[in-house]
Amino acid sequence: MLSISHSLTGAFIATHVPNPLLSVPLIFAAHYLEDWIPHWDIGTGLSNGTRAKSTAMKLEVIDLIITFGLVFWFWQLGHVAINYYAWMGAGIGIIPDFLEAPRNFLKWEPKPIKYFNDVHGFFHHSTPSKIFGLIPQAIIVVAIYFMR
Ligand SMILES: [Zn+2]
């Protein structure tokens, strides 16, 4: 899924489960389970060569800018104190995707990272359809907005 979906989910979990011994594994598990839902994301087409790496990088920058804005809006706006749980959760939420970056962009995959990438790949289901691939993510974003 997009960084938007994974980061908001991570922030949501971290702000509701303050113990990192519980929240970090939960955030990873949520990432893999969300990727199990057929979805459209930046990596769609990257592995089979139908999307250029430069296009993927530009889309990811846009994805991260929107992600930053939504985390700020949902958890930081109107609060003076920095919500460390929200920001850390948001960052942890996208670790599984960033662990794939060296393989996707540099064709380099050290063994410990390969283990995580294999788990990620096992759960990952993408669709080239933007509409059907974005609907579940829109539902996640709206649900988190109201439940946060
Ligand atoms: Zn992922």
Image (cartoon, helix red, strand yellow):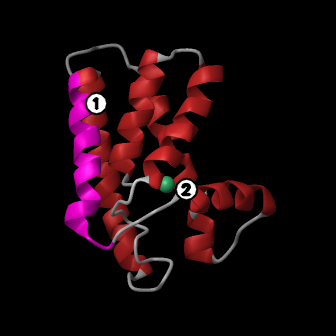
Q: Is mark 1 within 8 Å of ligand 1?
A: no
Residue placed most toward the observer, 77 or 40: 40
Residue farthest to the right? Answer: 111
Please state the horizontal and vertical placement of residue 81, each as a whole percent of the image: 35, 13
**Mark 1 or mark 2: whose residue is earlier in sequence:** 2
Quadrant showing the C terminus: top left
The residue beneath circle 1 is: 144
Query: From the viewer's perspective, is residue 53 above or below residue 69?
Result: below
Q: Which residues are magenta?
A: 128-146
Label 1, label 2: how far apart the Cα atoms are: 22 Å
Bin the neighbour count of mark 1 within 10 Å (Cα to Cα): few under 14, some 14-19, many 20 and up. some
* Residue found at x 32% / y 41%: 68
- What residue do we see at 51% from left, 60% from top? 124
Image-quadrant location for residue 19 = top right
Q: Is residue 63 visible?
A: yes
Q: What's the amino acid at mark 1?
A: Ile
